[in-house]
Each structure stands twice: as structure tokens, then as C-alpha cells.
Image (spheres, rainbow, N blue to C red):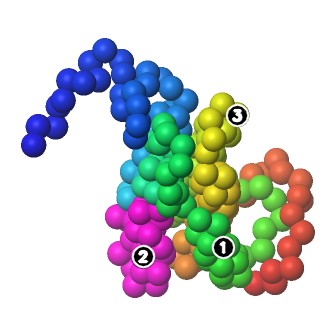
Amino acid sequence: MDIYTKTGDKGKTSLIGGRVDKDDMRVEAYGTIDELNSFVGQAASLIEAKELEDMKEELLTIQHELFDCGSDLAYAKKGHPFKVSDEMSEKLEKSIDRYMEESPAIERFILPGGTQLAATLHVCRTVTRRAERFVVTVSKEHEINKSVLSYLNRLSDYFFAAARAANARANVSDVEYVRSAKVFKSNNTK
């Protein structure tokens, strides 16, 4: 199989059911999701400690789900079955709750950092937010699977919670933004 097809040499690419310019917002959206998937893979590759194996498994699942998101956004024709469901977001919520329970309470904004894994998960969080913004733009012009938008919104929260849990499990403090007022009130007493 040749990896180069030359079909994109004139600035066009294929969606499922049509061709569009490479700067089409749908391509930007699923391209950003692909970029995110690479960072998720990088984060998973950093996990060697036994106490983080559950997170590594979740990250692999998320990589598959991100492919599903890209697939749902790559359709140019209506009437196809979508892959992303609301149940995927609900599963993320359970992980978010678990990770937040095991992390220390926060009162101030935190900066990306701590362990290398936590810092990489924060990169995942910010790329997820960018992908979400692109999907919002696409949704204004094209019919999309709304579950993709919900999933991305929840996924950015997941990465925040997972980054904090990665630091907590490594006994490394989150990096507080020193100019932040106390903005969070938490029931978490850890």
C-alpha cells in the first residue's frame, strides 16, 4: 500500500461521501481531534507505575473514542449511524468523580505541571478545548452528532481530574497560580 496518494496535492481531501478543501472546518475539527489523540498516546506512554495502570487503560479507551469522534465528524452525507453516544460521557463522569475524590481540595486556579504525566494530561485538556471550539463552529453550519460535543466537553474535565490524580498518586503537589484568589469551594476534605 502506498502511503502517498497524491489526491490531496491540490488542497482537497475526502470526507466520507464527498471532497472538501483541506481548510474546511470539519477537517480542522477532526484534525484537531487527531492531534489530541497523539497527545493522549504520549500521556499513556509515560505511564509505567502500577498505581497508574487504570489510567493507562482509560487513555487507550479514550484514543478509540476519539477515532469515533473523528469518524462522526467526517461524514458529508446525512443518515449514517453515529458511533459516539451519551453513555461515553457518562463513563467519563464516573472517572472524573473518582479522580477528584482522590485529589486534594483546591481553592485556587492551578497551572499545568507537577509530574510529566500531569503536564501532558493538561496539554490534552487544552487541545480538547480547542477541538471543542472547532466542533461548535462546525455545528453552526452542518448537522453533527451532538454527543461528540458533549463528549469533548466532558473529556476536558476528565483530563483536568486525571492530571490532578496523577500528581496526587505521585505525591507531587499541583502548581497553584500564585496570583489567584480563592475561587473554588470544595466538599473534598482530603
Q: Nearer the viewer, mark 3 or mark 1?
A: 3
Q: Earlier in the sequence, mark 3 or mark 2?
A: 2
Q: Residue furthest left?
A: 1
Q: Which residue is mark 2?
A: 57
Residue 140 circle label: 3
Q: Hey, what amino acid is under mark 3? A: Lys
The quadrant of the rendering that contains the N terminus is top left
Against 123, residue 50 (above or below) is below
Return the residue at label 1.
Answer: 90
Label 2 sits on a secondary structure element that is helix
Q: Which mark is residue 28?
A: none
Main SS, magenta residues: helix
Rendering quarter of residue 163: bottom right
| Residue drawn at point x = 89 percent, y = 58 percent | 183
Would residue 182 appear left or right of 176 to someone viewing this image? right
Which residue is at a point 50% across and 57% down the rendered structure image?
A: 81
Q: Which residues are magenta?
A: 44-65
Task: Check disc 3: other Cα within 10 Å, few if <14, some if 14-19, many if 20+.
Answer: few
Sequence-wise, which precedes: disc 3 or disc 1? 1
Label 3 and label 1: CA atoms lie apart by 25 Å
Tell me the amino acid under the disc marked 2: Glu
Q: Mark 1 falls on what kind of element? A: helix
Q: Nearer the viewer, mark 3 or mark 2?
A: 3
Residue 106, position as x, y percentages in the image: 78, 68
Q: Are marks 3 and 2 in contact (CB under 8 Å)?
A: no
Q: How many labels, in total?
A: 3
